[in-house]
Image (cartoon, rainbow, N blue to C red):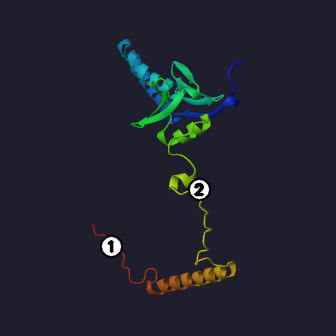
């Protein structure tokens, strides 16, 4: 019956604004093609962008990486992936035979999510203790209680005091400000 939507574990696609903008551009180029048949090729550019934005992307289906292009797709087993490379905002999967496959619509910041979904480990991503360089056998000291911790009763008292100060400050500002219209002269325009 084909692929069911529930077996897709992760999906990476371009922003929906790309195919929408391409559709608007496609509608905008229709009057140009009415002007003459030599301009018909202009329709191909927004149409190609529309298909690219709609179809291109990466899925993780049934534990496999499926790379989708506008005119085809390729399934890659996780055991065939040796790693990922990020160059100029492009993410590529490095295969066991040293070939690279570009992964469209996968930003570099989402590579750990992709690797985790495939069951792979990304170099440098591990437990927090390993990232900090601490030894895992050392006991961890409990965090000390902050000295600025306030009990709920004291917090309510401080909030009341802050409200009173704010009210006093607003009242003093109102006293120093001139009354509405007192001292301001209307400007008269002479023509």
The local secondary structure at tag 2 comes to loop
Q: Residues within 10 Å of mark 2 (few under 14, many from 20)?
A: few
Q: Say if 58 sits above or below 107 in the image.
A: above
Residue drawn at the location 56% of the way across and 55% of the way down? 129
Quarter of the image that includes the C terminus: bottom left
Q: Residues within 10 Å of mark 1 (few under 14, many from 20)?
A: few
Query: On the picture, is 102 further left or further right than 163?
Result: left
**Residue in the foreground of this view, choosing between 135 and 12:** 135
Q: Earlier in the sequence, mark 1 or mark 2?
A: 2
Report x, y in % for residue 22.
47, 29
Residue drawn at the location 57% of the way across and 81% of the way down? 162
Tell me where residue 100 sits by quadrant.
top left
**CB within 8 Å, label 1 to label 2:** no
Q: Which mark is residue 136?
A: 2
Q: CA distance from mark 1 to mark 2?
A: 80 Å
Q: Nearer the viewer, mark 1 or mark 2?
A: 2
Query: On the picture, is 140 further left or further right than 105?
Result: right
Report x, y in % for residue 43.
43, 20
Report x, y in % for residue 86.
43, 37
Say how many tags the image has. Answer: 2
Query: On the picture, is 4 further left or further right than 170?
Result: right
Q: Which mark is residue 188?
A: 1
- Residue occupying the far front of the picture: 137
Residue drawn at the location 43% of the way across and 27% of the way down? 28
Quarter of the image that includes the N terminus: top right
Report x, y in % for residue 93.
49, 30
Q: Which mark is residue 178?
A: none
Residue drawn at the location 56% of the way across and 47% of the way down? 126
- Residue occupying the far left of the picture: 191
- Residue occupying the far right of the picture: 1
The local secondary structure at tag 1 comes to loop
Q: Say if 170 sits above or below 63 in the image.
A: below
């Amino acid at each position: 019956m084909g692929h069911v939507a529930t077996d897709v574990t992760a999906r990476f696609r371009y922003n929906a604004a790309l195919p929408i903008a391409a559709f608007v551009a496609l509608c905008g180029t229709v009057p140009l093609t009415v002007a003459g048949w030599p301009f018909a090729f202009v329709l191909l550019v927004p149409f190609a962008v529309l298909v690219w934005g709609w179809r291109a992307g990466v899925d993780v289906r049934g534990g496999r990486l499926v790379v989708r292009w506008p005119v085809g797709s390729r399934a890659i087993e996780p055991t065939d992936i040796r790693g990922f490379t990020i160059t100029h905002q492009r993410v590529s999967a490095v295969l066991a035979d040293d070939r690279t496959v570009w992964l469209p619509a996968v930003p570099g910041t989402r590579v750990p999510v992709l690797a985790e979904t495939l069951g792979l480990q990304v170099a440098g991503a591990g437990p927090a203790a390993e990232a900090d360089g601490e030894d895992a056998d050392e006991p961890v000291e409990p965090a000390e209680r902050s000295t600025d911790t306030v009990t709920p009763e004291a917090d309510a008292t401080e909030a009341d005091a802050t409200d009173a100060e704010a009210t006093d400050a607003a009242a003093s500002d109102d006293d120093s400000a001139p009354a509405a219209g007192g001292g301001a002269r209307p400007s008269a325009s002479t023509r």
